[in-house]
Amino acid sequence: MKNVIVFIEHTGGKPRRVALECATKAREIADALGGAVQAVVLGKESNAVAEQLKAYPIDKIHVGEDSDVDAYVVDPQVDYLEAVARAAGPSLILVPYTMIGRDVGSRLAARLGAGITADIVDLAVRDGRVNCVSPKLGGLTITTCTFKSEYGVAAIRPNSFKAQPSAGAGEVVTLTKPAGKAYVMKVDDEVVEAAGEVGVEESSIVVSGGRGVGGPEPFKTILKDLADALGGSVGASRAAVDAGWIPHSHQVGQTGKTISPQLYIAVGISGAIQHKVGMRTSGTIVAINKDGSVPIGEFADLLVVGDLFQIVPELTKAIKATAASHA
Amino acid sequence: MKILVTVKLVPDTNADKRIDPATKRLVRTGVETVLNPFDEYALEAALQLKEKLGGDSTVTVVTMAPETGKEVVRKALAMGADDAVMLSDPGCEGSDVYGTAYALAAAIKKTGFDLVLCGTQSTDAITGELPGALAEFLGVPGLTYVRKLDVDGTTLKAERETDVGYLKVSAPLPALISVTKSINEPRYPSLKGIMGAKKKTIAPLTLADLSLDRPVGSEGAKTELVALAEPPPRSKGKVVQVADGAEGARVIVDFLREKKLI
């Protein structure tokens, strides 16, 4: 494989940060392989997104602003990507390890007879082969895998690479609609419940609540306020999700999401193994708990023992004051 | 309607697992093999559909696992599945996502289906890539991350989770759906179910029964493991007992400043 193709996930007319992280890393990999970086942007507002991608080190930006992409689930995207990949020849295809990226990546790999690696936190080229690094078994072991196939798909965990603007050739190419396709998985409606929110997978700061927060309210009040003050997202432990306090999409852990934010603040979470495996690779872990002997104390960088209902609002105030003094 | 549910056998989610430094494999001693917890939601969704649709609807569990996993498959039968198909073959060992999906798709096609239900991901590999690849190999429309599902025999209506809410989606059958844990609360097997499961059929399949046109297992794998390493250790940090909220906030702010996080 020689070229690197990046699937650009975007929302609200902007590329998701993970797409820019992948585009930045793609340059390094393509340079090592002696190939080019191509990006693929599909669906509504693609042309606007393509303009923003010009600031990143991409050689060619393929655009398919086709209403079918948003009207039908996943298949149109796979068709477009397959066409780009076949035209490019043996390539490494980067997709984000997100709900949409996993779908697109797995289907594309099946079509191309490509190997797929998931939840990748690092990429490197050794002896002309692409090495994909991923923590497995909840971070118990770190695996390095490579491809035996001509094409390879790597699903990249958000926050694994830095997104660094550095303009490339940025040639914009309009894609031709794949012919002879009939789509059936139809989107009848899109319901937005939390507009403008960034998912826990992509946030660089996550404030999570567990059993200790005692009910649904704190997720909407004190935890949300702290997350907002830090520019982060609200996460949750299994106990909180199972109790129905917050939707499953916020769950961090073995039966939820595995994330690596720069900062993880665990509020009222004991840190049982099922939670630990979802967040142990976070940059810095701060825990707030009334019990000083909770398991999270064994791997948190800081455990503050006290009343979360007093500490969290005070912390929000202090963060806001810090931000104001910097403004 | 014929409903198939894919299940995987995984090491117990709640066990504190470790890797043997010598063999670089998971130490299985003392770690029970269980049904992948995510698959229980798919099975529950299948059972609820069967109960709703009535008539001659059936629920069949499909798995790729060594024969020693039979007793775990019985748990799915005890929950209420009608029968199971078990693909056991040394040639499956070392299959990656591609090979697993390819072989399972062949087993599913051979069994016949109107609807395939999967869990979102397994708790051991956590790739979340199988449902998509499976739909592709089956040549049917696929929808993942479904939190609500209704099927009337010829079409499905579903709610697919997104980061900011959900999509309402509809499609004709046959199709493949993967479900999230928001969809239901899986039932526990009843005593009657456990007793009844002993009489239910677990049909064995081998690769020879599937006449695949390409190898699976290690030979057919599209990816290869080149190294295993121990994760960087995460050591115990500071523990600070605070008297009130203001002190707690101060301790955290000082720490975050020191780490240059604010």
Image (cartoon, coloured by chain):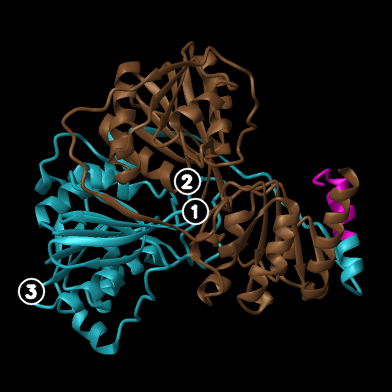
Q: Residues within 10 Å of mark 3 (few under 14, many from 20)?
A: few
Answer whether labels 1 and 2 touch (C-beta < 8 Å).
yes
Tell me which chain the residue with mark 3 is part of: B
Which of A175 and A9 lies nearest the eye of the viewer?
A175
- Circle number at residue B163: 1
Q: In this rendering, would A46 be left or right of A158?
A: left
Q: Which stretch is magenta?
A: B251-262
Q: Chain of mark 2?
A: A
Circle 2 SS class: loop
Decide if residue B234 is in sight here.
yes
Determine which of the numbered discs, if any, sits on residue B56 in the image: 3
Q: Residue at x 21, y 45 (%)?
A: B103
Q: Quadrant of residue A114?
A: top left
Q: Main secondary structure of the magenta part?
A: helix
CA neighbours of label 2 inside 10 A, class few (<14), some (14 to 19), many (20+): many
Q: Secondary structure at mark 3?
A: loop
Task: Return the x and y of residue B68 as percentages of the image width and height.
Answer: 28, 63
Outermost residue on the bottom side: it is B191
Q: Secondary structure at mark 1?
A: loop
The residue singled out by tag 2 in the image is: A98
Q: Are marks 1 and 2 on the same chain?
A: no
Q: Is residue A297 magenta?
A: no
Q: Which of A308 and B225 lies nearest the eye of the viewer? A: A308
